[in-house]
Amino acid sequence: MEKEQLNGLNAIELKGINKSFGSVVANKNIDLTVRKGEILALLGENGSGKTTLMNMLSGIYRPDSGSVFVYGQEVHIYTPQDALNLGIGMIHQHYKLVDNLSAAENIVLGTKTKKQSMSQLAKNIEQLSLHFGLNIDPNKKIYDMSVSEKQTVEIVKVLYRGAKILVLDEPTAVLTPQESKKLFAIITKMKEEGNSIIIITHKLNEVMEVSDRVSVLRKGECVATVETKKSSAEQLTELMVGRAVDLSIERPETFKSDPVLEIVRLGVRNDEGVEMLKDVNFDLRSGEILGVAGVAGSGQKELCEALAGLQKVEKGAILYYKENIVGRTPDEIIRLGISMSFVPEDRLGMGLVASMGMTDNMLLKTYKQSRGGFVKRSPARLKAKALIERLDIITPGTETPVSKLSGGNVQKVLLGREIESQPNVLITAYPVRGLDINSAYTIYDLLNEQKMKGVAILFIGEDLDVLLELCDRIMVLYDGQVQDILQADQVTKEQIGLLMTGQKPRELKEVR
Amino acid sequence: MLKSRRIKGEPLFKIQRIEEESPTKSFIVRVLAVLAALTAGGFFLSLLGHNPLVIYQAMFKGSFGSVMSTQGTVKIVVPLVINALAVSLAFKMRFWNIGTEGQMIVGAIAASYFALFKGNWPHFLLISTMALVSIIAGGLYGLIPAYFKARFSTNETLLTLMANYIALYAVQYLKEGPWKDPGAKGFPQIARFAQNARLSMPLGVHFGWIIALLAVPLVYIYLRYSKQGYEIAVVGESEKTATYAGMSVPKVIMRTMFLSGGLAGLAGMLQASGADRTLTDTVAGGVGFTAIIVAWLANLNPAAVLLVSFLFALLEKGGGYIQSMFKISASAADVLQGIILFFVLAFEFFLRYRIIINKKGD
Amino acid sequence: MDLNYLISFIYAVIVAGTPLLLATLGEIITQKAGNLNLGVEGMMYIGVASGFAVAYYTKNPIFFILAAILSGALAAFLYALLTVTLKANQTVTGLALSIFGTGFANFVGETITNTSPTRTAVLDGKLMSYFKPINIPLLSDLPILGRLLFQYNIFVYLAVLIALVTGYFLFNDIRGLNLRAVGENAAAADASGIDVFKYKYLAICFGGALSGLAGAYISVITAGGTWTANSVSGLGWISVALVIFAGWNPYKAIFGSAIFGALRVLRFYLPRQSFNLPNSLYGALPFLVTALVIIFTSIFNSKEIQQPAGCGVNYDREER
């Protein structure tokens, strides 16, 4: 009888939703409708308020004002439990799974399931997965899983709770193009069974590929809702950014010298003794950007840390102007002019001291170089001021803790400081993570500027489109090994995607 | 199933994070916390049938009412300030050194060795040696947990705590065994120090007050302006970031803990040689714990440490006074100190969050 | 060494280990909820003092036990209020509780003894008789087994029972699974629809109640019903360390607390002639061994047995 009632109703209706954090307005008077049996794309730049809006649907935040209707009935969602009871399940961008529990345990967590045997539970889960073409091992621990496996667990978890409305937050950010395709097939099937799906994304091609309708958010406001078929990528971009923009990234031609850095048969084990890099060979020339592609956890972090002297190298050599720097301390490597900036998922975990202002953060890698036992703050303050000016960093002052700055500004501080030190080698990992388009392009420009100055740049990225446009060459890591190094203007995204999962497309030419 | 979709039980208020910080507000909140604690304590006292105002007044009189009582209060302040500074150094690094008590004892033991067995050395040499060995001994005792923390991330809270007890039993061993005073008629105690091994008494309080007064600006400058102080702050915030910046995290941890333990050790020497004039197993007597409250209440700021130490010494000294005057257990002061810390911890919430009462019919 | 000697040693070990077991179990559950409560020592003191005061004035064994348990739970509730709701630093809050509890116990004890004409305070004999070793006809009289199994005070059986129940709860019940999830990753637990605050509050208060019960034990068994200053003297801290030693496993906690019980009574059972060591060494032994245990477990830490990942971190749903 429920089915009858539900027919013709909207699954979700949001009316006049407002939400602010302190003085920052995250959502402003948003109206949004999700129909039954459709895929709605929620498109917007990073920081436009998409996740905040959906977090109010999933019970993480509560709106300051506005009303929420689920299947026509007004509801108040105060906790994630409330959302689940209403059949709303959200798959967050950073998965919310308990690492040291198995898939089955994570799935059953918090449900009213009376104790049932693990084998019975496993059977139920398998049935559910099979129905949607999902594939999971119920007894596998989360910490042994790849990102795409984890995502599958998250999906099964919400399905197990009987969710009819699914929210997926940037679900493809960490997937290969092939894995993304598979995910889209699954959500399309769910849609066909009458479920409603909201997919949060900032990638236009995905919107065009999978969604029925698109709602575009800009600076916390919902600027338009359109039928996907009646729209175009150009129109959506303009709606998203607020003006017509050219989304292509420059790749200036430069003179490329002999290798500055040569990595020879590099092998690294992590603290648990697992081999994270196996026999890695590549070189890096001045005036080039070498991109690194790979699914998360393929050894990117270890590579960065090994080059910066933070990770013990087990085998092989890192030659800097033909001199092996393996075994040097991080401090010595900084002095050699090798600079590393790693933007972790929480953005502030490494590289910046969150509670300190820009001045003290400018000192982080250079404070030792001044004479005497005291920290010299005034030159650092001047540098900080110069950086604010040059990169348009928005901050109340040089002493405001960097944790109070927005993500884009934090990353400008980090990268700006590294460039300020005039390095010969610049290693940068995920520098545009979570940035809006404007800030991202500022960062690309900065990198290109450095490249033209003759700096050798290693760019570890997530977004394949960006890697293909920005980099000169792309190295694909898979399971700690270099799958291939390719000329960026001679490969496709799909080819890289295959390499990322360890397959070797036959038609690829070696360009090494 | 659909009917009951309206969920009941909206909380009466919601909590919102405050993004901006303000030192003034932080100070005011702490003062308010102390006042609230005194009010709560007063309520408790009136339950016991006392007039809290009379009691508080008596406590103040008992601690600052005369030159002699003020001298007694300062005597309590000295080890408290130095230990709280030691705690601040470690806590700034997020190293939970609960062991200044033990480090103080070990410092006192080392100093006592020279006081008892090298008592004939020239006074200045003897006192300097005692001070030096107490710093080294306390520092080394602090270095042990620091080493294991740095090397194996061993839980420093528990390790420093166990070290307190071990140090305490070491004193017991000495007074019952090798250092037992033969002149004490079999009573297990250590002989009183010769005059030569005692600290001089400028203005009627042992020399330690000058040391304490000097230590405050030194630690302040060290933390705020020195490279090592900068390293402490970075390591405290994130060890990863510190390593990334080229700092040797184990070195910073061990160096800082040596200093922290060294300060506490020095306090032990000052207490034994200046205040007690012998080594007893109450040489620390809980100062290490009170120092933790002091340091936190002072927000790990050395200047504030001095101020808070006076407040706490007032409670301690006044507590002894009201015991004799009103038959209120002297432990009331300890209880009050605990309550103050609870209020500070609770009130700190209002520095980081604001509460918004939900309007009806929202 | 004859058999009787061995049996009375084992008996003494169990009796000495029981308060450790109770407090350790409480702290295991607390830590499984992601809260490191360093206030065990203080909560035990609060249990000792409240229990003693109520027993002293009411002479009622039920009120005595209830007072100890409830005061421990109340103290833990204060800790929960500060850390879970007000998000205060867990380490400092726990320390504050320990400092406060110690002072509180001294205050209560001194107040009672000060008003007593003899300057001592002893609990009512009838009340004490409830906590004597039990006597089950036939069973308690069995040779060897009778003494080894059926002659303890009721707390001992209660403690073992609680250990088995908490163990079952943690590893075999879905709510135990939920609790573990809360301690490992509160955000994940929350998103799964688990009421994180409720679990944390309940677990922390349960921990306090067990610490309070351990305090009751110390009042009537360890201190024998006479007010003794500093009666907890570090047992709370050892319990926190025992949690690590037991690998957050209630079953293993039984053996862990027995081992530390043994260290506490060792001095009375080693023949004086061959082990003429100073008393202070025996006194220091449990603390020394605890220190070594903490060090060794950190050196040989395994991936499987780890402190709950969320331990020490306060959860804020709206944290961005």
Image: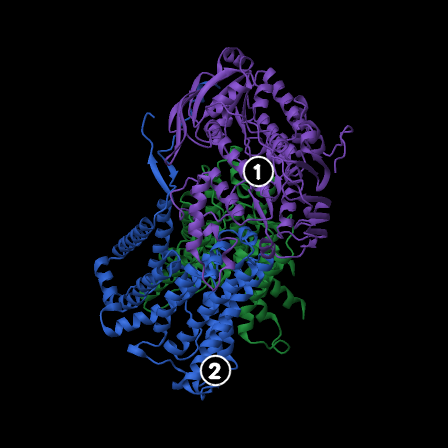
Chain colours: A purple, B blue, C green
- At numbered mark 2, what does the secondary structure look like: helix, strand or loop? helix
Name which residue type carries label 1: Asn
Judging depth in this view, the residue of A422 and C282 nearest the camera is A422
The residue carrying mark 1 is A448
Q: Position of residue A377 (x, y in %)?
A: 43, 55
In the image, residue B284 above or below residue A253: below
Judging depth in this view, the residue of C241 and A68 nearest the camera is A68
In the image, residue B52 above or below residue A86: below
How far, Cα to Cα, is label 2 from label 1?
68 Å
The residue carrying mark 2 is B114
The crowd level at tag 1 (other Cα within 10 Å; few <14, some 14-19, many 20+) is many
Name the residue rendered at 48%, 25% in the picture: A241
The crowd level at tag 2 (other Cα within 10 Å; few <14, some 14-19, many 20+) is some
Q: Give yes or no for contact between labels 2 and 1 (Cβ–Cβ under 8 Å).
A: no
Name which residue type carries label 2: Phe
- At numbered mark 1, what does the secondary structure look like: helix, strand or loop? helix
